[in-house]
């Protein structure tokens, strides 16, 4: 209790300071952002769904190095990292499981069919990211299956000039290395970006490397990323885009999945992603956008360490997708229609060889024909070769009370198909269940929004039911020494969550002022209700957040910038914690230098499994831009 009071006291101090000032242009730009929904394009200022955006300005000023760390600043997003430097993390939204969140790259689904443990193995350096969009609530109507509790869409930069950017950084906890006779734990990284634009053609190439000798025994990591994005636009009516990404991610997995017996475990995950798409404005009122995509993943896991083949498993998975989306504008509203197909297969030493097919169709309608009222309604029809037919309707309403105040309401439904690991894995500590059925959810949410050039604020309440909720369980009784009781998934029944959330972005002062201020404040409360039978242990269901508070504050004086990022998390079954990070930077003509302190108060905390996260960590870095 004392630790909780201390954490909340520190947070209250930051809140008192942080809600005073801010900066103008960030919120103005935010209101104009068009959310990428593949068919109907709706600006953020007119959205009726609960959507959070991490802008380019946010990314630049936050003291974070990876996408996983950036997501810790977004209200409603639960980031459960098993290691620093982006080695591994599970991402969930508003009390859902990590399997219930769809991950997209520029609107293309890149969810891993083997296991959502690999969803964040993304071949995209932070330098390539323009913004991150978070759509909260069931989103099958928009993005198809597996968007049960929400979706995260990572949007990469649009190349508009000829620019080269180079960045390097490094840091340490200054704590002794347990695997060496001398030396300290450290980590370092570098990113390189080259952009070219000649009017009709643009290219962006992004490279990233990070390595660390860890932050405790057997947690060293090494990852390399490559991402390319190209666009050809011969005229205003036609555009072709292609992208490709590759990541090789290696890390010591001590305590990641099977503590305490996996002390020597090691994992290597390689992911390649590519897509090609085009958009054709066939008339002022009609456009069509076909797209092909492919995601290939290799996962190799050494349960007892790389020195032995015992306990070694290899998994190869591939997902091919084809889709076409179209939009039709009429004087009374807009229609969106789309068809998609998705082919998933896996070949694994622990899961076996399996494949499945998925076909879906979308229909949406948006209208503002009634004064002050926006209506966005639609449905997604899905057929899966294992689970059959499903229909997922949804409705979003927005009513403008005044020019700045708006009442919003949404109702939606969604489906999550079990992963190949859920269904078929066959390991000593984990056994799949081929009799699982899909999870189905429906949610209603109501709230109020306030939008101006300086303030973006919202508050909402939601109620969600998930039927046939899947959780991994095992018996919780005494067993003979040396006996391993495996985890096994089952449809345990209904999972009900009631939640309240509010967020506030405040910006004040002229952009040309010598000193500028900016703050974001958010609070989320979740009340999940799920029944766990006596004598059984739950692996994931009772580890969700109960309370989440995020407070970020930036002061920018001429070329100096200081940002503090603070978060308080209280989980149902873990000890609560308060983490404060800090970045100080100075901008020369083309050179930015920065210093970060993460976990300023050196708190000991766990986000997932039995993996302690790093204590206080110091970093220095520099970023140079060259226009040619």
Image (spheres, grey):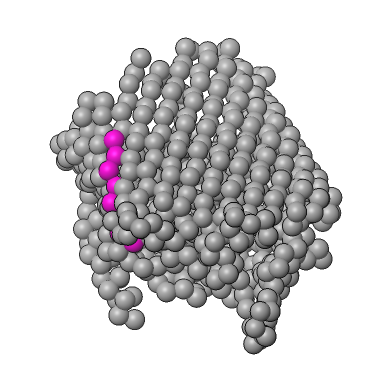
Q: Is residue 275 above or below residue 61?
A: above
Q: Which corner quadrant of the image does residue 191 belong to?
A: top left
Residue at the front extreme, as displayed: 181
Give the residues drawn in magenta, as a range.
Answer: 615-622
Say if the magenta span includes residue 21: no
Tell how many labels: 0
**Which residue is rendered at x = 31% and y = 76% of the image?**
3
Q: Is residue 437 above or below residue 144?
A: below
Q: Is residue 384 above or below residue 259?
A: above
Q: Nearer the viewer, residue 260 or 420?
A: 260
Position of the C terminus by quadrant: top left
Say if the magenta span includes residue 616: yes
Left or right of 85, for residue 201: right
User: Residue 581: x and y, percent?
Assistant: 30, 55
User: Residue 556: x and y, percent?
Assistant: 21, 41
Left or right of 552, for residue 92: right
User: Residue 153: x and y, percent?
Assistant: 54, 43
Q: Is residue 609 above or below residue 475?
A: above
Q: Nearer the viewer, residue 357 or 611?
A: 611
Magenta stretch prevailing secondary structure: strand
**Which residue is rendered at x = 50% and y = 18% of the image?**
202
**Which residue is rendered at x = 26% and y = 41% of the image?**
594
Position of the N terminus by quadrant: bottom left
User: Residue 608: x and y, percent?
Assistant: 50, 65
Is residue 327 something that shows in the picture? no
Is residue 66 something that shows in the picture? yes
**Which residue is rendered at x = 27% and y = 43% of the image?**
620
């Amino acid at each position: 209790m004392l630790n909780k009071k201390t954490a909340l006291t520190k947070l209250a101090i930051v809140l008192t300071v942080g809600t005073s000032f801010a900066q103008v242009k960030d919120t103005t730009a935010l209101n104009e952002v068009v959310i990428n929904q593949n068919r109907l394009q709706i600006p953020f200022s007119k959205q009726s769904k609960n959507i959070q955006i991490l802008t380019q300005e946010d990314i630049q000023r936050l003291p974070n190095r990876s996408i996983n760390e950036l997501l810790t600043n977004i209200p409603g997003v639960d980031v459960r990292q098993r290691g620093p430097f982006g080695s591994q993390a599970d991402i969930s939204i508003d009390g859902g499981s990590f399997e219930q969140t769809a991950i997209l790259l520029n609107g293309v689904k890149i969810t891993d069919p083997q296991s959502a443990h690999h969803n964040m193995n993304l071949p995209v350096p932070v330098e390539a990211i323009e913004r991150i969009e978070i759509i909260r609530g069931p989103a099958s109507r928009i993005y198809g299956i597996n968007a049960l509790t929400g979706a995260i869409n990572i949007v990469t930069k649009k190349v508009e000039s000829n620019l080269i950017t180079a960045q390097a950084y490094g840091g340490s906890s200054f704590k002794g290395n347990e695997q060496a006779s001398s030396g300290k734990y450290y980590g370092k990284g570098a990113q390189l970006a080259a952009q070219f634009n000649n009017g009709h053609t643009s290219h962006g190439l992004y490279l990233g490397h990070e390595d660390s000798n860890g932050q405790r025994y057997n947690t060293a990591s090494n990852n390399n990323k490559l991402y390319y994005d190209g666009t050809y636009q011969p005229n205003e009516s036609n555009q072709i885009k292609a992208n490709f990404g590759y990541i090789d991610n290696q890390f010591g997995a001590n305590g990641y999945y099977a503590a305490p017996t996996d002390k020597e475990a090691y994992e290597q995950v390689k992911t390649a992603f590519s897509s090609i798409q085009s958009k054709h404005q066939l008339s002022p009122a009609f456009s069509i956008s076909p797209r092909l995509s492919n995601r290939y993943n290799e996962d190799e896991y050494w349960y007892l360490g790389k020195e032995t083949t015992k306990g070694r498993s290899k998994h190869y998975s591939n997902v091919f997708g084809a889709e076409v989306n179209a939009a039709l504008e009429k004087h009374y509203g807009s229609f969106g229609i789309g068809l998609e197909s998705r082919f998933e297969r896996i070949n694994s030493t622990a899961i076996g060889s399996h494949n499945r097919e998925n076909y879906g169709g979308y229909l949406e309608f948006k209208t503002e024909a009634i004064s002050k009222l926006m209506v966005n309604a639609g449905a997604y029809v899905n057929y899966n070769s294992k689970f059959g037919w499903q229909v997922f309707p949804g409705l979003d309403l927005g009513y403008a009370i005044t020019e700045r105040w708006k009442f919003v309401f949404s109702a939606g439904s969604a489906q999550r198909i079990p992963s190949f690991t859920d269904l078929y894995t066959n390991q000593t500590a984990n056994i799949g269940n081929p009799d699982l059925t899909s999870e189905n959810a429906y949610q209603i949410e109501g709230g109020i929004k306030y939008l101006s050039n300086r303030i973006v604020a919202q508050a909402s309440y939601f109620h969600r039911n998930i039927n046939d909720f899947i959780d991994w369980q095992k018996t919780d009784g005494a067993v003979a020494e040396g006996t391993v009781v495996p985890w096994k998934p089952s449809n345990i029944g209904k999972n009900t969550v009631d939640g309240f959330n509010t967020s506030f972005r405040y910006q004040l002062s002229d952009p040309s002022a010598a000193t500028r201020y900016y703050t974001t404040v958010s609070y989320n409360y979740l009340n999940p209700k799920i029944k766990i039978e006596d004598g059984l242990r739950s692996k994931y269901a009772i580890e969700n957040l109960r309370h989440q508070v995020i407070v970020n504050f930036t002061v920018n004086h001429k070329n100096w910038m200081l940002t503090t990022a603070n978060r308080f998390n209280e989980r149902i079954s873990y000890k609560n914690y308060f983490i404060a990070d800090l970045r100080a930077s100075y901008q020369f003509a083309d050179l930015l230098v920065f210093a970060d302190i993460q976990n300023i108060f050196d708190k000991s905390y766990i986000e997932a499994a039995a993996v302690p996260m790093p204590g206080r960590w110091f970093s220095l870095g520099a970023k140079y831009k060259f226009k040619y």
